[in-house]
Structure formats: C-alpha cells, structure tokens
Image (spheres, grey):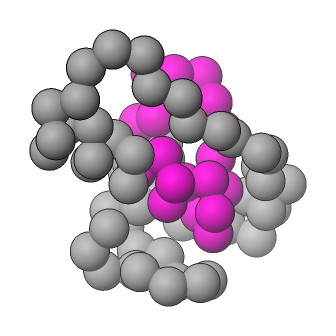
Amino acid sequence: LHKGDGFGKVNKQLFRFMTDFARKEGILTDPIYSGKLFMKAKHLICSKELKGKILVIHSGGAITLAGFQDQLKK
C-alpha cells in the first residue's frame, strides 16, 4: 500500500482494488483489514514473481462495508 497505510485510513486506490477484486474473485473485503490484506498480497505476489500455491487467509470483515457505501458507489 502506498497512501492509506495505517488503521482506518482508506483511499480511492484501495476502493478501486476492492471493487475489482469483488468482481473478479467474488470475494467481498472490508477497507480496514481484508481489503488492505489482499491488496498487499497481490502486490507482493506480483512484485516478487511468486509461483505455486499461495494461501491468504480472509477472516471476514465484510460487515464493515456498511460504513463505506458512498465510497463504493464511485
């Protein structure tokens, strides 16, 4: 992550990633924990050119989306 690093901080890049991820993978993520987790995981996988099976644990958190409807509409 670049901008938006830190607890409770979000940005447009993160919301773009979350909506794209939900469309492509069918997984809803929240912007506080899971969205940042998967965004960082994707960055590491691509930048380090990791191969093989990779496990990223999604522990829920979609309920947090309730506070971000306006940002997700954009």
Residue 55's place in the image compared with 73, above or below, is above
Residue found 77% across the figure and 45% down from its top = 59
Q: Position of residue 57 (x, y in %)?
A: 65, 38
Q: Quadrant of the N terminus?
A: bottom left
Q: Give the residues in magenta.
A: 20-39
Q: Is residue 30 left or right of residue 24?
A: right
Q: Nearer the viewer, residue 36 or 72?
A: 36
Q: Nearer the viewer, residue 49 or 4?
A: 49
Residue found 54% across the figure and 29% down from its top = 55
Q: Position of residue 16 (x, y in %)?
A: 38, 51
Q: Position of residue 64 (x, y in %)?
A: 79, 62
Q: Position of residue 14 (x, y in %)?
A: 41, 61
View extreme (right): residue: 63
Task: Tell me where residue 74 sits by quadrant.
Answer: bottom left
Number of residue marks: 0
Residue found 48% across the figure and 46% down from its top = 38
Task: Tell me where residue 35 sits by quadrant.
Answer: bottom right
On the question of residue 73 being in view, the answer is no
Asked whether residue 74 is drawn in magenta, I would say: no
On the question of residue 20 being in view, the answer is yes
Residue 66's place in the image compared with 19, above or below, is below
Asked whether residue 33 is drawn in magenta, I would say: yes
Q: Nearer the viewer, residue 49 or 37?
A: 49
Q: Is residue 58 left or right of residue 14?
A: right
Residue 62's place in the image compared with 1, above or below, is above
Most prominent secondary structure in the magenta stretch?
Answer: helix
View extreme (top): residue: 52
